[in-house]
Every structure is written in structure tokens, then in C-alpha cells.
Image: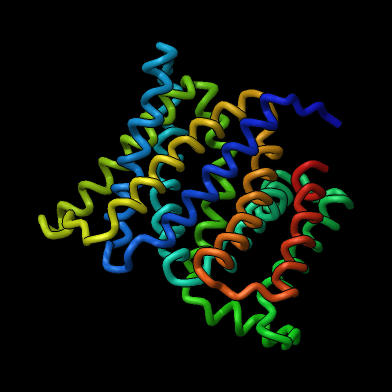
């Protein structure tokens, strides 16, 4: 067992709330704003928030060992975030975000296949509960037959991009932790966001000047999504230095899922069935077994 300090807990909860808020505002960006342009603005608004940290602390530490994992992390982050925005825009928030509970399951399974570190009995039970919970979340109406659930899952336009997000984000927490051993939190954050801005700007420039045109009504949600995501990112990297990655991932997944269901219902009028709510509760019970066993 381990002791979770109050600062680590507060940082983890605050990080999770910030990311959950960002998810909601990514969802409500007008549909006529292209996904790469939306991500460019979100990342661009994150950059000054993250840059404040090294500016205040004066900690610009960076070693040459950073670049290989740093560039790999940025490339994964670029693809994953584009897919994530696409998934949120195509399907209900309250269905897509709970799918991220599979991320820690993938991490455990990859460790078994690659490293021979197979799940413990507690983790196996947690994986079963997460799968059962997701099954309940995707039950369409009163039809709980497995084929009906799979059809409902497959019918969601956001399912395929979200599956890509799940695979890619399974690799980012350990990469982030590795990166902050070779660079300060501030340096890592600024470099990651700068690489994303450069890549997105280059991609949009190829399309011509019109690709940078921001449609009406897009600026406000993009601004809030970027600022809250920037705050969440800094808090996450700071929390990694105080506790295990698994603890922060647990808080992010649980709070993010509950936040998506609540905001989906209250702000977006997404349906909230008893099975969806029960599925969320089951996932919340399974995730600690997966992550903390």
C-alpha cells in the first residue's frame, strides 16, 4: 500500500476537474471549425498558461536525453488529440469519455504481452468490472442483448477515433513521467505544446490561408478549452512528481467520466438511463482494482 499526501490528492482532483471542463468545451466548438484548427487554438491557448510555470520558477532544466521520448510523446499527443476532438464532436460526451476507462486496462494488458507482467487476480477482477460497466453504459434503451449493445457501440461515429485515442493514450503517462526526469515540468510542457503548434500550423498552411479562418462562435469555447486544459496539464505533471502515475490516472478517469455524464445530461440534454448510471458506478468500482493493485 502507499500513502497519498493531501497535496497530491488536491493536485490530482484539480487536474481531473480541469480536464473534464476542457472536454466539455471541446465538444461544444461549432462543427464548421475544422478539427486541426480547433486543436491549434486549444494548444495555442494552453501554451502561455504552461509557459508561466518556468517563467515563475526559473526552472528551465533540459538534458539531451529528453529529445527522443519528448518527440515521440509529441507525435503521439498530436494524433491522439486530433482523434479525441473528432470523437467528441461525432458522438455524445457521456458515451465517449467513459470509453477512456479502457486506457488503464490496455496499459495492464500491454505490460502482460510485452513484459510478461500479467494482471493480478485483483486487476483481472477490475478489468472484468470495467468491461461490464462499459457494456451497461452502451445498453440501448431496454435491449441488454450483447449483439444490441455491440451494434449501438459500432453505430457511434466517434467509436473508431476513440479507440485510436485509447491505444495512443495508453503510452503517454509513462512517457510523460520519463520526460520529466530529463527536463523540468515547465520545459517539458512548453516544448510539447510548441511542437504541436508547429506541426498543426504547418499542416494548415499547406491547405492555404482559408484553413486558418475561425468561424463565428468558436473563439469562446476554444479559449476556455485551451486554458482549462493548460491548467490541467501543469497540475498533472506536478502531481506525477508527488505520487504514482496510476493514482492520477484513476482520478482523471473517474472524475472525467462522472463529469461527462453530468454535463452531458445538464448542458447537452444527452439521455441518462439507469443502465448508463449503473455502468459508471461499476467502472468506478473496477478502475481502482486495475490501477492500484
Residue 157, placed above or below residue 144: above
Q: How many numbered marks are there?
A: 0
Furthest-left residue in this view: 209
Furthest-top residue in this view: 58
Residue 266 falls in which quadrant of the image?
bottom right
Identify which residue is drawn at 45% across, 42% down: 229
In the picture, measured across the screen, residue 289 lies left or right of residue 280, that is right
In the picture, measured across the screen, residue 53 lies left or right of residue 209, that is right
Q: Can you give x and y, in whole percent of width and height, for residue 130 in the image?
A: 75, 61
Furthest-front residue in this view: 266
Q: Nearer the viewer, residue 146 or 251?
A: 251
Q: How is the image coloured?
A: rainbow
Q: Can you give x and y, in whole percent of width and height, for residue 242 in the image?
A: 66, 24
Furthest-right residue in this view: 121
Q: Nearer the viewer, residue 243 or 74?
A: 243
Quadrant of the snapshot with the C terminus:
top right
Residue 14, placed above or below residue 57: below
Identify which residue is drawn at 47% across, 34% down: 69
Identify which residue is drawn at 51% across, 49% down: 21
Quadrant of the snapshot with the N terminus:
top right
Q: Can you give x and y, in whole percent of width and height, for residue 279 in the image?
A: 74, 67
Residue 282, placed above or below residue 177: below
Residue 13 falls in which quadrant of the image?
top right
In the picture, measured across the screen, residue 106 lies left or right of residue 3, that is left
Q: Can you give x and y, in whole percent of width and height, for residue 227 in the image?
A: 40, 40
Identify which residue is drawn at 36% across, 26% down: 51
Amino acid at each position: 500500500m502507499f500513502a497519498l499526501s493531501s497535496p497530491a490528492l488536491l493536485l490530482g482532483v484539480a487536474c481531473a476537474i480541469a480536464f473534464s471542463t476542457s472536454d466539455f468545451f471541446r465538444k461544444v466548438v461549432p462543427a464548421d471549425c475544422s478539427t486541426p484548427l480547433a486543436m491549434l487554438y486549444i494548444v495555442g491557448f494552453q501554451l502561455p498558461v504552461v509557459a508561466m510555470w518556468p517563467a515563475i520558477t526559473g526552472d528551465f532544466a533540459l538534458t539531451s536525453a529528453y529529445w527522443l521520448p519528448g518527440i515521440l510523446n509529441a507525435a503521439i499527443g498530436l494524433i491522439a488529440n486530433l482523434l479525441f476532438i473528432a470523437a467528441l464532436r461525432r458522438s455524445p460526451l457521456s458515451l465517449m469519455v467513459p470509453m477512456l476507462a479502457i486506457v488503464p486496462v490496455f496499459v495492464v494488458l500491454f505490460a502482460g504481452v510485452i513484459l510478461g507482467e500479467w494482471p493480478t487476480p485483483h486487476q483481472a477482477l477490475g478489468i472484468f468490472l470495467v468491461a461490464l460497466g462499459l457494456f451497461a453504459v452502451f445498453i440501448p434503451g431496454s435491449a441488454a442483448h450483447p449483439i444490441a449493445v455491440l451494434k449501438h457501440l459500432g453505430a457511434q461515429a466517434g467509436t473508431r477515433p476513440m479507440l485510436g485515442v485509447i491505444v495512443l493514450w495508453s503510452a503517454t503517462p509513462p512517457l510523460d513521467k520519463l520526460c520529466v526526469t530529463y527536463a523540468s515540468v515547465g520545459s517539458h510542457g512548453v516544448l510539447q505544446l510548441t511542437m504541436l503548434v508547429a506541426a498543426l500550423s504547418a499542416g494548415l498552411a499547406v491547405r492555404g490561408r482559408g484553413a486558418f479562418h475561425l468561424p463565428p462562435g468558436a473563439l469562446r469555447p476554444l479559449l476556455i478549452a485551451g486554458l482549462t486544459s493548460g491548467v490541467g496539464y501543469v497540475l498533472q505533471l506536478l502531481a506525477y512528481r508527488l505520487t504514482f502515475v496510476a493514482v492520477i490516472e484513476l482520478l482523471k478517469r473517474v472524475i472525467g467520466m462522472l463529469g461527462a455524464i453530468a454535463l452531458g445530461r445538464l448542458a447537452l440534454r444527452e439521455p441518462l438511463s439507469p443502465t448508463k448510471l449503473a455502468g459508471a458506478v461499476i467502472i468506478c468500482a473496477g478502475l481502482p482494482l486495475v490501477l492500484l493493485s
